[in-house]
Amino acid sequence: MQTAFSEAAERNKRPILKKLHALLASSKSVLEIGSGTGQHAVYFAPALPHLVWQPSELPDKLPMLLRQCLLHPSENLARPIILDIDNDVWTSVEADTVFTANTLHIIHWRQVCRLFARVGALLPSNGIFCAYGPFNMDGRYTSESNAQFDIWLRNRDHQSGIRDIGDLQYQAEQNGLGLQENNAMPSNNRLLVWRKLAN
Ligand SMILES: C[S@@+](CC[C@H](N)C(=O)[O-])C[C@H]1O[C@@H](n2cnc3c(N)ncnc32)[C@H](O)[C@@H]1O
């Protein structure tokens, strides 16, 4: 059984997990959005046995993700589900934590807004939303390589591109999420952590 492979996911899975250990210590159920090859899901789930990790993807990517999960089963790794940010109704997922890596610069801005609205509605008070990837700060790139990456992204799809943390923060606030951590990560990436505020 062949699986897809992402070199970036292979590189960043260890530093991300290091952060998740402390961050998700009280989490019970994690919904991962845009799981891609599933390398993160199969690596994180067995390392975080106190919670259930639910991977998800668009319909056309689900077979690839499912193959990865079947090859690397663990008791707390749920069978991947279809989840499209564009869908009005998300399946009956219940989660106290949402994780997504390298998606916010791929999806369009209207989808980013929709994602924050869905996550805000899904999470209970104190629930966590973690987003990993490249982000701009105060309207500026954090590195030359990110600036080049952004040009590449926008040439490929002009509605994609590296997002500014300030713009994300506005969406988060609109949906009851408060920024709790802004962690610098290797290769000019960041791990942003929002917490759902009490109603
Ligand atoms: C760059 S990949 C990141 C994959 C993985 N999270 C990683 O870090 O390796 C972006 C992922 O977002 C998913 N994606 C794109 N549009 C989406 C949407 N509307 N709803 C859910 N996922 C979407 C893609 O299918 C793709 O797997």
Image (cartoon, helix red, strand yellow):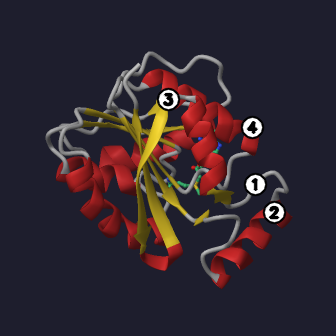
Task: Say few, some or many: other residues with alpha carbon within 10 Å of mark 1 (under 14 / 14 to 19 / 20 or more).
Answer: many
Give the residue at mark 4. 110
Task: Say few, some or many: other residues with alpha carbon within 10 Å of mark 4 (under 14 / 14 to 19 / 20 or more).
Answer: few
Q: Quadrant of residue 24?
A: top left
Which SS class for mark 4?
Answer: helix
Task: Say few, some or many: other residues with alpha carbon within 10 Å of mark 3 (under 14 / 14 to 19 / 20 or more).
Answer: many
The amino acid marked with disc number 1 is: Ser
Which SS class for mark 1?
Answer: loop
Residue 169 relative to residue 43: left or right? right
Label 3 – label 4 distance at C-alpha: 18 Å
Give the residue at mark 2. 154
Give coordinates of residue 166: x percent, y percent: 63, 53
1 or 3: tag closer to the N-terminus: 1
Question: Would you say the residues marked 1 and 2 are in contact, meaning their CB atoms lie under 8 Å apart?
Answer: yes
CB of residue at label 3: within 8 Å of ligand 1? Answer: no
User: Of the numbered discs in the image, which one, if any, rests on residue 160?
Assistant: 1
The image shows residue 31, relative to residue 186, as above or below, that is: above
Asked if residue 58 can be seen in this view, the reply is no
Label 1 – label 3 distance at C-alpha: 25 Å
Q: Name the front one of labels 3 and 4.
A: 3
Question: Would you say the residues marked 4 and 1 are in contact, meaning their CB atoms lie under 8 Å apart?
Answer: no
4 or 2: tag closer to the N-terminus: 4
User: Of the numbered discs in the image, which one, if any, rests on residue 176?
Assistant: 3
3 or 4: tag closer to the N-terminus: 4
Give coordinates of residue 142: x percent, y percent: 60, 75
Residue 117 relative to residue 23: left or right? right
Give coordinates of residue 177: x percent, y percent: 47, 35
The amino acid marked with disc number 4 is: Arg
What's the residue at 50%, 30% (across, down)?
119
